[in-house]
Image (cartoon, coloured by chain):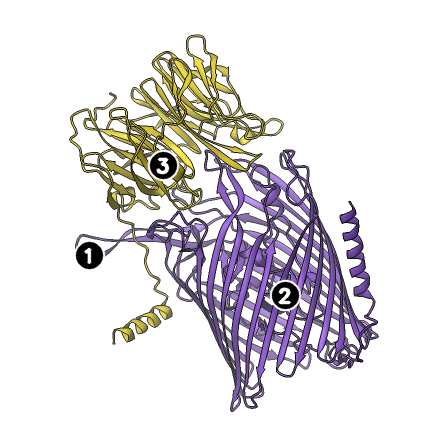
Amino acid sequence: MIKRTIRVILVLGMIVCAITPSAFAMSHAEQDSLISRDISEVEVVALRRREIIAPQRLSGERLKHLSSYSVADAVRYFAGVQIKDYGGVGGLKTIDVRSMGSHHLGVFYDGLQIGNAQNGIVDLGKFSIENMEEVTLFNGQKSELLQPAKDYGTSSSVYLTTRHPSFKENDRFNISATTKCGSFGLVNGSVLYEQKITDKIALVANAEMTHATGKYTFRYHKMLEDLNGNKITAWDTTGTRQNGDIRSLRIEGGVYGTMMDGKWHLKAYFYDSERGLPRAIIRNVWTSSQSQWDKNVFVQGNMRKTLCSLSDLLVSAKYSYDYMRYFNPDTTLLYVDNTFTQQAFYFSVANVWHVTPILDFNVSADYERNWMTSDMANFAFPKRNMVLIAMAASLKTGPVSLQISALENLINDRSTRYTSQAGNFNQWRKRLTPSAFLNYQMPCSESQINIHAFFKRMFRMPTFNDLYYTDMGNVSLRPEYASQLDLGIGFATQISNVTCQLSADIYHNEVTDKIVAVPKGNSQYRWMMMNIGKVDVNGMDVKISFENNESSFVNYQLSVSYTLQEALDMTDPSDRGPHGTYRGQISYIPKHSGSAIAAISCKGWHMNYSFIYVGERYHVSANIPENYEPAWYTHDMNIGREFKLSDKLTINLSGEVNNVFDQQYDVVLNYPMPGRNYKGIIRIQI
Amino acid sequence: MRYRIYIITLILCALVGCREEKYVLTPEEQVVGDTALVYQRDITGFYLLNEGNMGSNKATLDHYDYVTGVYTRNIYASANPSMVQELGDVGNDLQIYGSRMYGVINCSNFIEVMDVHSTRHIGTVNVPNCRYVKFSGQYGYVSSYAGPVKMDPSYEQIGYVAKFDTASLQIVATCNVGFQPEEIEIVGNRMYVANSGGYMAPNYETTVSVIDMDSFTELKRIEVAPNLHRLRADKKGNLWVSSRGDYYDIPSRLFCLDLATELVTDTVPVAVSDLCMCGDSLYVIGSEFSYVTYESTVSYTIVDVDSHTVVNEKFITDGTDALIKVPYAVSVNPQNGDVFITDAKNYVSPGKLYCFGRDGAQKWSVVTGDIPAHIAFTYEIHNNYD
């Protein structure tokens, strides 16, 4: 009790400290000109990047012309990323960064994290690329200064930034409308409206609806070597992917404002969808009748303000409500009709003190509460309270930038578990996780060369499903840790009017206490979550890009990325041998993978070509022929023309051919992916 | 030079998108046992059906040959190379009857009928969510979860037993039983079906259905315990029934049912995952999960059907049971007393089969397919309906 009181006092103290600027800062630092510069205008000028280590980024025109429908499609092009895609428009799409598993990825939408306390996975296929301005991937964490504690709390993170309202001179509003039609019976329409209310306040509203039948043909076949060594077809079959239909509606609204020495942002998000869930294609069963309904609502806002020349403040808050219904009426399977409702409340205060011109301190304190209900039998009705306190110091002196941070995690769960088990998180549990980021800019005039490195140790919490799911959950689970060590080099130079950039990173990650479903007892259908897994990852990410000056007659961009990964299953040292899992490459992680994007634009025409390569993989860490999956690679093309009809009115027509060579492949075993498919896009801007 | 050709091929392949092909896997042979002389009516070997994890479509068939001592993995695919998607998803039972072998492929909703010598496909019997099969005369009987649906007031789907003609492979009659029926046993003119109610958790079924074979109708139900699974009749007029319990307060147990009175006469305090009747001995393997320790307790016991007691607390004598992670199935060669135990390991990677001699010492072990689970012995002579 006393301990708890002390902790509460400590937490409150931190919050107070975070709000009041430090009184004992000795030197009078210069005012942070970067933050105050853009406050007088509504148009948001991109801040100079303040991260210690530059992230991977796709933005603006480049993102718009990339043949991608959802955020998941775009993120595939980043180095070190593997996507898990169940196929089609509505299929679940998650990503795994540097083989740590998708639970270790944080997804941030306009600065605030999208949570999923139930299963810890964010379906990136649900986020449309239509209103995205930028998609950024950070390894480790965003090594910025003024950020909530949550930003320190993931092993890697994707930041999705939606379009900020921006107006040309004398304009008071913008309207743009887009419609996309194509394969899979896809009909998509979206409208974006931006209105300048005062010089300091702007409003943005955006709506998008999608309808698709999700049907596509796929082909499965296997070959055979006959007695003479000739390769003959053993069997060959085609089918139509069924039950991949989706209807969705997304409505978003936001207000962006500036004030004295600061700015603020308020946003509301509503997403409603109904989708079919395709099943694995197995012998004799090619159809499915399962469906899922989702309703996701959130309201969030933040405010940044320079309190005095010494201190900046960031306050953020969010409330979210997520409803999900899963329905399986298939009479050959277990009948299921369950609804799950999750709610979360989040509040954060972050404060930066500019102690000296080269030294800054950040203290952030976050509080989050999650609770969940369901109509499932024996449901545990879990509630979680979380307090995160982050402390970071940042040093920038000459060529060296350094950030050291520590995150204190305080977690407490309550549930009505069927058994009388109290569980690990029933009392306040605390975990301290450190990280350090270093960048050294070589003093070199003509080109820029930097050497960077980071270390991070972070965990992911067992999710509500891991802990409390009826029968399967295990209340005695511990967090699953991921430790990362990275060393990289960046190089940028200008050759005539072409900017060449190269970056290469080598890394070693270790995932310990990995939460794995393990069999319990005597039948296939009984599993239990356990902290038994261990994965060692050694990898290398390389990115090269060329881009010419924007003022040229012909603009072009070329970027290539390559990932080499050895992700070894270290779980069970007794399971050695050619059929064993020990030191086998873990499931679905290829040794080699890569991507390439080439874009060219000239006289209003633009063309984009993109290529993804995913090398051979195994479905499980027993690397035997039975579990082998050959490499796949797809080529996507996009060509379009922009017509400037008047000063205000622009029409953009473009067409897309994806998987040009109609490659038939599975990303996930028995979930066939679409072959060649088409899309036509009309975009009107006023 | 060779390097250059490789690179050019790679680039061409990447451009055109000719993906590497998948091949029908050839069987893998491994010598594990001794060669042995095999006489007429002798057991010549056995087939092992690997379940394959749900959704993976990886049910496979392995074979062991007592004559040569050779264990062969994955024989179905190459014996039937033109079969689209091979054996199917989740093999739940394997039986040999006459010259045919019947594999119950649960999630693929059919029974695969094969020639017992060549494992060539003969036909299928389509039964949704089929579980276990038994034979009598010219008919096969298969239990299924997927009976008629009622909305009364909430969703209910009763299970049934389908009777199929082994010649035409057509279903000729059905008989509704309890919820989620599992194993079947036929004694004389009566059929017994263990009802589990597995989909109704925590409201499990507690009864054995009794079916009259002539009219193929359910006569009555015998109250036993929640979540019934296995059924074995002995030669003393008893029916041994296993209950999986509710996984919380009610433990898994073995019950003895007197077939004359059709009442439960005894309870043996052992947990049952799988069992095998050999003479008067009932080999029982149990793996019971405890919510207190979060660990499974494993047992290998022999129950004497005469005295209804555990006569052997641990039939593996050489300590090699420590190697078995998840004991999944047990089977005993009735002729030489070899005891086979399968290890399902983590359910998604290859399992293992252990062979123990009559003395309980390990003879050999071999890697199997995923979730090795069902063993059917082959004999030298196969007469229909013998």
- Disc 2 marks a residue whose amino acid type is Leu
Output the letter for the chain in purple: A
Identify the image quadrant of residue A451.
Answer: bottom right
Residue drawn at (20%, 36%) of the image? B34
**What separation in Å lies between label 1 and label 2 (alpha carbons)?**
53 Å
Residue B373 in view (yes/no): no
B87 vs A50, left or right, is left
Q: Nearer the viewer, mark 1 or mark 3?
A: 3
Q: Name the residue under label 3.
A: B320
Residue B84 in view (yes/no): yes
Tags 1 and 2 both on a single chain? yes
Between B378 and A230, which is closer to the camera in this rendering? B378
- Disc 3 marks a residue whose amino acid type is Thr
B6 vs A331, left or right, is left
Q: Mark 1 points at which residue?
A: A229
Between B328 and A247, which is closer to the camera in this rendering? B328
Q: Name the residue under label 2.
A: A160
Identify the secondary structure beneath mark 2.
strand
Q: Mark 2 lies on which chain?
A: A
Tags 1 and 3 both on a single chain? no
**What separation in Å lies between label 1 and label 3 (alpha carbons)?**
43 Å
